[in-house]
Amino acid sequence: MNESVSLIGLWMQMTAQGWLVYDMTGSKFLLGLINTIAGIPIILFTPLGGVIADHHNKKNLLVATQIIFTVLSFLVGLLIFTGGINFYNLSVIVFLIGTANAIDSPTRQSFVAELVGPGSLGNAIALNSLAFNTARMIGPAVAGYIIGLVGVESCYFINAATFLGVILALLMLKGDFSPKSTPVASASKAFAEGMQYITSNKRLLFSLILVAFTSIFVMPYSVMMPVFARDIFQTGARGLGTLMAFSGFGALTGALMLAQFSEGIDLKRLIYGSTFLIAAALFVFAVSDIYNLSLAALAMLGWGIVSQGASVNTYIQRSVPNQLRGRIMGFYVISFVGFMPAGSFLSGVAAHYFGVRAALSLGALISLLPITALFLLVAAKKIKY
């Protein structure tokens, strides 16, 4: 329950951040850049975060990261409330949040496997995705109304408060969460072990590449939502909440399906189908002038993204040895989240020069390249997947 409330607060803050930057600067480029700044530490530090997760108590690590998130979220809210916020100090705080995320994300992903048995892993991942995407539907909608009625700083204060419940829940959690990996001579050697495992496993490597392309060329759609809400559909902050909520509704539907049928689903077929659906839905959203059609496209897009992400996550975790889990999930986090800053930056530049519709349309087409290549290689029997 505490985790679900915290996730709602997180999505409120993410929605508020996009609105804050675009309202403060009016720049599509800076809207993309703030997400790039948030994600740079994910790329730089997540491999190290995976090593740390494998060699330290995961429960203690998660408590530490939640405290950091609490302090930084409250600080942004305070700066907005006092009129001291600007793009530069926001960028510094966002970078620090991203640095904490570089440790939190691989730790959280691998922590799931320690809480449940191998036979329940697929269902646990689906339920975790269900909680995340329930919040993804509720959080932005609530944020849109709160921004309009109270002010954007309220979203940051609420998010800071929700982390306190998570910290309390973690402190009450009982169990042996000591590290499962034996000590290694250096972090670089531990990192090399994880990298060697990935490069020697082509199915794992292709799975990570597939997620990375979605992260780079599809996920920037959410960064550009304030442009659609304010300039294209002219619906304001409440409209931004509605757009994000429909994407979350689709994601929630996908998570419910995975939670209900996780053990009987053909993961490979779902990975193929969801990837093609993602590209089609994003393209329709990018070119549509019909508001209701755009909402439907966002719902389908949300369904495809969560289905692809959760199925690839399950596909990977079922084959990863426990002593490498933190490091491998660190690479998964880089693919799923870490490359998003590059996509946000490219999307921001493309939207600045060619328009936001062209930027998203091109991303939809490019996202099809790895799944098409994989499909052809499997058909030619040059790789098993």
Image (tube, rainbow, N blue to C red):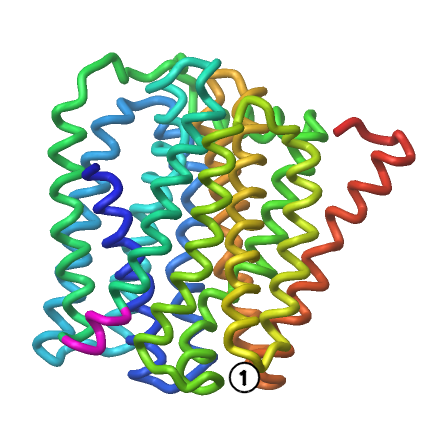
Q: Which residues are magenta?
A: 144-149
Q: Relative to residue 71, is residue 284 drawn left or right? A: right
359 versus 109 height, above or below? below
What is the residue that sits farthest to the right in this orientation?
Answer: 380
Amino acid type, callout 1: His
At numbered mark 1, what does the secondary structure look like: helix, strand or loop? helix
Q: Quadrant of the C terminus?
A: top right
Q: Relative to residue 179, is residue 197 drawn left or right? A: right
Q: Which residue lies under the disc numbered 1?
A: 352
Of residues 177 and 13, the one drawn nearer to the viewer in this rendering = 13
User: Count the marks: how many?
Assistant: 1
Q: Relative to residue 159, is residue 247 drawn left or right? A: right
Image x and y of residue 216, in percent: 58, 58
Question: Which residue occupies 15% across, 31% down?
Answer: 169
75 versus 191 height, above or below? below
Image x and y of residue 268, in percent: 68, 32
Question: Which residue occupies 29% across, 26% down?
Answer: 58
Bin the neighbour count of mark 1 within 10 Å (Cα to Cα): few under 14, some 14-19, many 20 and up: some
The verdict on residue 145 being magenta is yes
Magenta highlight: main SS: helix
Q: Quadrant of the N terminus?
A: top left
Question: Which residue occupies 42% across, 39% down?
Answer: 129
